[in-house]
Image (cartoon, rainbow, N blue to C red):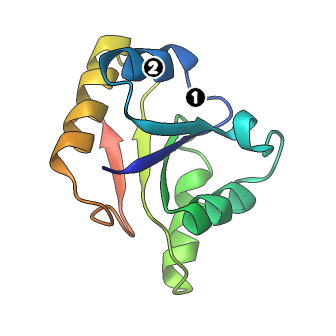
Amino acid sequence: MLKLLADENFDNTVVRGLLRRNPNIDIVRVQDVGLSGEHDPTILTWAAQENRVLLTHDVATITRYAYERIAQGQPMPGVIEVGVDVSIGKVIEDILIILECSLEGELEGQIQYLPL
């Protein structure tokens, strides 16, 4: 199963909902791993080192830094961009579908946009 990293401003209601639906999901928050306040490239580097797909609402900058990593030949295990106006239930369902249907490493170098 894919491992996840929730960005600092990612909706914690989604994180809690995912864990309620499947307590075996391997998800940590930026705050849990000592990365609060760090810049996006640092977060993406940590995610790559830990092979974690980043969950974020930040469409303004994360995408650019993720594509820069890819262009430079650096690992980028994937980003899931979640619109802020999507219902919590829909976000949880879509992430669960991605987790259920994706193999480890399958999102490497990709940015997925939710809702599906």
Q: Residues within 10 Å of mark 1 (few under 14, many from 20)?
A: many
In the image, is residue 28 above or below residue 53? above
Residue 8 found in image quarter: top right
Where, by quadrant of the figure, is residue 65 drawn? bottom right
Q: Amino acid at mark 2?
A: Val
- Left-right relation of 92 to 78: left
Q: Which mark is residue 10?
A: 1
Q: Position of residue 28 (x, y in %)?
A: 58, 38
User: As drawn, is 1 to the left or to the right of 50?
Assistant: left
Q: What residue is shown at x 27% (from left), y 42% (from top)? A: 99
Q: Secondary structure at mark 1?
A: loop
At 71% from the left and 35% from the top, the residue drawn is 32
Amino acid type, mark 1: Phe
The structure residue drawn at horizontal position 33% and vertical position 66%, both measured from the top left corner, is 105
Query: In the rendered image, which quarter contains the C terminus?
Result: top left
* Residue 16 on image: x %, y %: 48, 16
In what element is the residue under mark 2? Answer: helix
Marks 2 and 1: in contact by CB < 8 Å?
A: yes
Which percent across, then down, holds residue 51? 50, 62
Of residues 84 and 37, the one drawn nearer to the viewer in this rendering = 37
The location of residue 88, given as percent across then percent down, is: 38, 13
Q: Which residue is mark 2?
A: 14
Q: Is residue 24 above or below residue 21?
A: below
